[in-house]
Amino acid sequence: MRIATWNINGLKARLDFVRLWLETRQPDIVGLQELKTQEEAFPHDVFEDLGYHALVHGQKAWNGVAILSRQPGELLHKGLAGQDGFGARLISARFDDLVFETVYCPNGKTLEHDDFPRKLAWFDDLAEHWRTHHDPDQPTVLCGDFNIAPAALDSWRGADGDGSLFHTAEERRRFDALLALGMHDLYRAHHPDGNAFSWWDYRGGAFHRGHGLRIDMLLGTSAVRDRVEAVEIDREFRKKQDGLTASDHAPVYADLR
């Protein structure tokens, strides 16, 4: 089984690119973020033609998450309780014995912006959601764009980035709190010293200069981690393909035995 996460930065702009990636990589379950699409406008027929079912929590022009899957899933949650003000950012479903949840975590904008403490509160509510609804002893995946670089190794700036947005101790404590609930960073488990990134700004040639952050994660409980054979950041699909413009995020996928 291949599972994946991808912030596509707008489904309408990226539909043909996503189609090409699905045909090339053949994932079984995918969490998508930043759809920027209302639910009634979601192109279910396109994905059905590719062999995928879709569960969608959409929003006009901003946010939005979805789960694509080869087999139909049972919808469990749509939205994070108490955080409607931040928009459509969470959806989860059950596939046989596997629970799969994807999130698009708030950015925070700047350390001085009102959205920064709200971002921290959103993560606190996410941790409470997990304590309430998920069993750490069961096969469970939490994936998405976390908008946090968990350690200096996850940033092109290294330790020089410490204290800036995405690199603060407050943000990293929230990420660590999720791991403390029984989850593992699947990429880091397989690449303990990997200095690889999943997001690069469109501006300033950041991708080609290696100025990126690893903020897109696949987290899994021990029952998932123990099945992982490989985890990859799909850099090839951060590049243009067949004249199609990529998202500023690369997909991340894991193969489970």
Image (cartoon, helix red, strand yellow):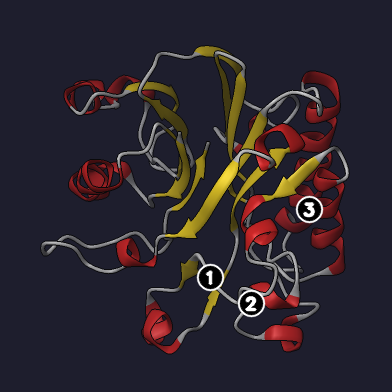
Front residue of 88 and 126 = 126
Tag count in the figure?
Answer: 3
Q: Position of residue 21 (x, y in %)?
A: 26, 48
Residue at disc 3, secondary structure = helix
Residue 122: image quadrant is top right
Which amino acid lies under the numbered mark 2 shown in the image of this protein?
Ser
Q: Choose the circle earlier in sequence order: 3 or 1.
A: 3
Image quarter hosting the N terminus: top left
Q: Position of residue 138 (x, y in %)?
A: 74, 23
Mark 2 Cα-neighbour bin, 10 Å: few <14, some 14–19, many ≥20: many
Front residue of 79 and 127 = 127
Tell me if residue 16 comes above or below residue 206 in the rendering. Answer: above
Q: Mark 3 = which residue? A: 175
Which amino acid lies under the numbered mark 3 shown in the image of this protein?
Phe
Residue 204: image quadrant is bottom left
Q: Position of residue 63 (x, y in %)?
A: 49, 41
Residue at disc 2, secondary structure = loop
Label pair 1/2, CB-CB below 8 angstroms: yes
Front residue of 124 and 193 = 193
Residue at disc 1, secondary structure = loop
Q: Mark 2 = which residue? A: 155
Q: Residue at x 50, y 64 (%)?
A: 198
Tell me if residue 28 comes above or below residue 226 in the rendering. Answer: above
Question: How far apart in space, not on screen, are marks 1 and 2 (Cα)?
Answer: 7 Å
Q: Is residue 23 left or right of residue 33?
A: left
Q: Mark 1 = which residue? A: 197
Which amino acid lies under the numbered mark 1 shown in the image of this protein?
Phe
Label pair 3/1, CB-CB below 8 angstroms: no
Residue 130: image quadrant is top right
